[in-house]
Amino acid sequence: MPEFVLPEEIREGDTHVGRRMLRIEDRSLLRGEGQFVDDVPVKKGTLQAAFLRSPHAHAEIVSIDTSEAEKLPGVFAVLTGREAAEQTDPLIVGFENPIDYYGIAVDKVRYVGEPVVAIAAVDRYRAEDALELIKVVYNVLAAAIDPVEAASEDAPLLHPRSDSNCVSKRNFVHGHPDKAFADAEHTTELTVRYPRNSITPMETYAVISEHNEETGGFDVLSNFQGPFSVHTVMALALRIRTAALRHRSPKNSGGSFGSKLVIFPYIVVLCVLARKARRPVKWIEDRLEHLSAASVAPNRVTRTEAAYNSDGIVTALRLTHWDDHGAYLRAPMPAPIYRMHGVSTNGYNIRNLEVTNHIMMTNKCPTGAVRGFGGPQLYFAVERMMHKISTELGIDPLDLMQRNMIKADQFPYKAIAGALLDSGDYLKTIEETVSEGGLDALRQRRDEARAQGRLYGIGFAACVEPSQSNMGYISTLKTGMERERAGPKDGAVASVTVSVDALGSVNVIGDSVPQGQGHQTALSQIVADQLGLEPNDIVVSLDTDTAKDGWSIAAGNYSCRFAPASASAAHQAAFRVREKMARIAALRLNVPPGDIEFSGGKIHAANNKDNAIPFYRVGGLAHWSPSSLPDDVEPGIRETSMWNAPELTPTTANDEINTSLAYGFGFDFCGVEIDRDTGVVRVDRYVSAHDCGTILNPGLAEGQIRGSWASAWGATFLEEFCYDDDGAFRSGSFAEYLVPTATELPDFQLVHPTPHPSPYTRLGAKGIAEGNQYTTPVCVANAVADALGIEDIQLPLKPAKVLQWMQVAEPAPSQGGTTAIAIEGKSSAIDGSGDMHVPASPQEVWDLLLDPDQMARLIPGCERLEQSGDGRFNGTVMLGVGPVKGRFEVAIELTDLDEPRRATLTGTADGPLGSSRGQGSFVIEPDETGSTVRYDYTVELSGKIAAVGGRLIKGAARQLIDRFMRSLVKQAGGGTESEPGPQRSGFLGWLRRIFGGRP
Amino acid sequence: MKHLSRDSRHPVSFELNGRVVEGFSEPRMLLCDFLRHEIGATGTHVGCEHGVCGACTILIDGKASRSCLMLAVQADGTEIHTIEGLTRPDGSFGILQQAFHENFALQCGFCTPGILMSLSEFLKDNPDPSVEEIKVALSGNICRCTGYTEIINACLDAAAALRASKAEAV
């Protein structure tokens, strides 16, 4: 691995920063001695919480009966949404909106998995037992699923205080886009759909909450990651002083990738539950809960229009986004789209821009932060467009990108939407990557492959990689007048405290809430350099405690905040300690403080290393002998830096916003081959380069890049949260929501280009953890477009989808027109039909079907069936697939009765495993030896049962129906029935039955 | 097969990393919950509770097993090894731990206990593995932080160190 070049001031001498120092964190983690929330010892008597969750995407809650659950021994508290709403205020977001959100459903459920009732019991097992005893009656409503369709007038409306599912629409004009479009030689457009995904950390959400009688507030331990601006949101919702909400995080968090930001609604609900239970309550989210209801990145539809000239210069972009935030907005949502606003033109010198943002509500899991935070969606649109323009002009895509790139002498560069791009030489980075990564050889490889008739494509993608978010950018969503009323919002304060005790031991605390990035290690390197010590001399504690730490609203771990912000704060705090100790030492050494240096555990005169005092002695003086300190020096040594950068200014009146402080640059290219028979896209070669300024620790930095590559590859090929048209959720386990494992993840070549340190951070460091989230999905998509000669590429690149494109790729692809936003139809319904012979007269068959006692014997797993009215039946049925078994309350209604010929049957089944709705009809016709019964049915599944085993369940449901029909024949007098079976026959039908293919 | 009454707690005892441990468990309690919350061996982590992610992998009588797919009462009388047993008696890293440390093969460390146990079983039977063989051995463990390359490198290093030292255990 080549050496990273460091800025001048750091390169002097032998620094720890820049070294591949092994991680301090490993010492506990590799021994199984880490401390994650669930490892922290709790008080005896701490209860465990569990949530009853909605099986429906959209429904009114008619009634909730918790009486049986409350009676179960070991249950201490049961909390409904209505009760929670009486004790809390809605969780606020950054702008006026029509959503009342309490973290638990009140009167209505709006997505599958939404909490409906919370229970605290002596252990999780009993809490889940109690959930099964709760009876909820729902009135199911139609669901809004597609973000573009959800905007239409006749779409089901999620929030009654609004007249539209579009809760915010803003239009931004920068430069003169209309004129640029009118003047351009060419214009084009492309609509892309970016899927809904997340990075699903291995450790799920974890919260321990307790009511504090002294403060009237709550003590909480959780793996919340910040930003701590959300602490205020929680305290306001709980109607307590912010200081009375004491939040702590333990030293380890099992990954987050953004997702642990929106744990906070659960914290609020669990605080209320703990107060009601009068005991501490602990909740460890399970995987189904996490996948269905924790957090996802907003999926987005973007229509991009571009104006360009024949020389390939792009003069204007118009971006229209429909950003799908699911059922509720949770602070700081809809931040991702605004976090990228300033860099809407990526690394291109495009001076005219129009952006329209629709913030859409749909019946899906609400969104949160996911690594990349708005970038993957934006750059997918922009970089796909660059590819499309190159195709239209017949220019090589890379050439086109280079023609439009910001040039080195333009830095710092003020992008048209407001980002102040701090440093870089994008063309040089590309040049170095192309050369080291062997683009020429790859082009040759493509030519050879194509000559053999193989489908091979090359793709490119570049990204400006923002780090350290401006806390004011979300205000860009408001109008200038609204902003003026609210007062300015800007900056991003980072806090690190460095203290030296009486024996010279150094302690560092900070607000960076690490989740595995190695912050302890990097901070020890930074502080050791300042104080002339070894990193091992520094004790870094990054567990947090809002009651004791120095922190501000920007605290936390998100948007690549550590390298620019926390590193700067640590550098500044250590520098202040150094200055103070230099003044104390100066008095002893008889030299001016400015001539003091620190090295090898000593403080000495710059020009005479022998004129020295041990570091620990100065620590001792500061604590043991205040009288011997210079007059204006306070005793003790403890310096807190609240570091901020002046470049993070508020949104201007023209809606320009410097969304982040430091901007790295990433550039990737790749070669892919597509299998003609299977549609499998194989990454043949992938090259990735990142200029993130100063590298604090190459081992940590490379880990961030490789990790980003892995999750970005997952987003490209596998990961998507799937919903049916009716809102049923289909991705509830790791068997449905696929993530990369070692066997399928390809390796890639990492190029280390010449770094361009940031002039705005104290060490020149920029963020590095998100680059591949931006580049990889669109780089591979561009390669697929190159291979197939089509532009409508949708992720993830599942083989079945790619095969379809290959079939339509033969005729020329059609694009354009404002109607290009096609809605992909999906349905989870299990349907079928059949007929069979029953050796009984139509009247006998009819009597059988309408007799509840007879039916109870025929329906597999039926425990009870009673007639509750004319043509109405109620009962309980025990159903299961493999180890998953559950009891369902069944209600059936027969209508259109035409005795003894035909009837229509509608029914519902509800239970802890989920719910299903079905409709069917049967026709009885006399034949030579009895009757022929013809039937058809459609069954829709929702809830847990659909989320974790859609494919299995479909097969099982068909079998159940077949079993029922066979029993019917037997009951009616046996004999030979014709084979009942699904509609489809032949090999394809067999395949579909096995794999549960969609109709 | 012995029938255990559903609502009472039954004694469970096994050898954990060379020491006999004892506790009581309801029949339905998962082994991972028993290890973590009854015994206090929190080194083993729980990531999915449906047998896919591999974080809870431990060695039961020498075989890598998912402790989330097994009941505590089923482990009675077995010999169990977990991450806590990899550290040498003097407190220093074992060969596999050291290789992970030197290769930056963990970040958040949540999946690491399961990966270490999968690989410790694998290396016993595969002293000189290829990269492809290691990938297959890792296919039952999900890591969302690293991208696996560092883990594969660590495994190669550990295998080489094992061969050089002729040690039997990692």
Image (cartoon, rainbow, N blue to C red):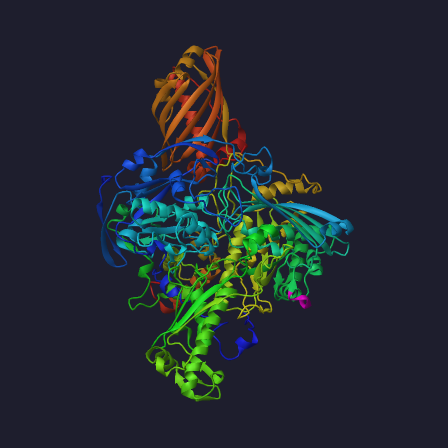
| Residue A108 image offset from top left, x and y in percent | 45, 36
- A972 is higher (above) or lower (below) than A266: above
| Residue A803 image offset from top left, x and y in percent | 60, 42
Residue name at image x 30 percent, y 37 percent: A70
Left or right placement of residue A614 versus residue A481 in this view: left
Tell me, yes or no, if residue A85 can be seen here. yes
| Residue A89 image offset from top left, x and y in percent | 43, 45
> Closest to the observer: B110 or B80?
B110
Residue B85 counted in the magenta span: no
Name the image quarter holding the C terminus of chain A: top right
Residue name at image x 22 percent, y 44 percent: B9
Left or right placement of residue B12 versus residue A1 in this view: left
- A86 is higher (above) or lower (below) than A11: above
Q: In which image quadrant can residue B108 be found? A: bottom left
Left or right placement of residue A512 versus residue A809 in this view: left
Q: In which image quadrant can residue A977 be found? A: top left
| Residue A153 image offset from top left, x and y in percent | 60, 34
Outermost front residue? A485
> Closest to the observer: A987 or B42?
B42
Tell me, yes or no, if residue A246 can be seen here. no
The secondary structure that dominates the magenta segment is: helix
The magenta segment is A408-412
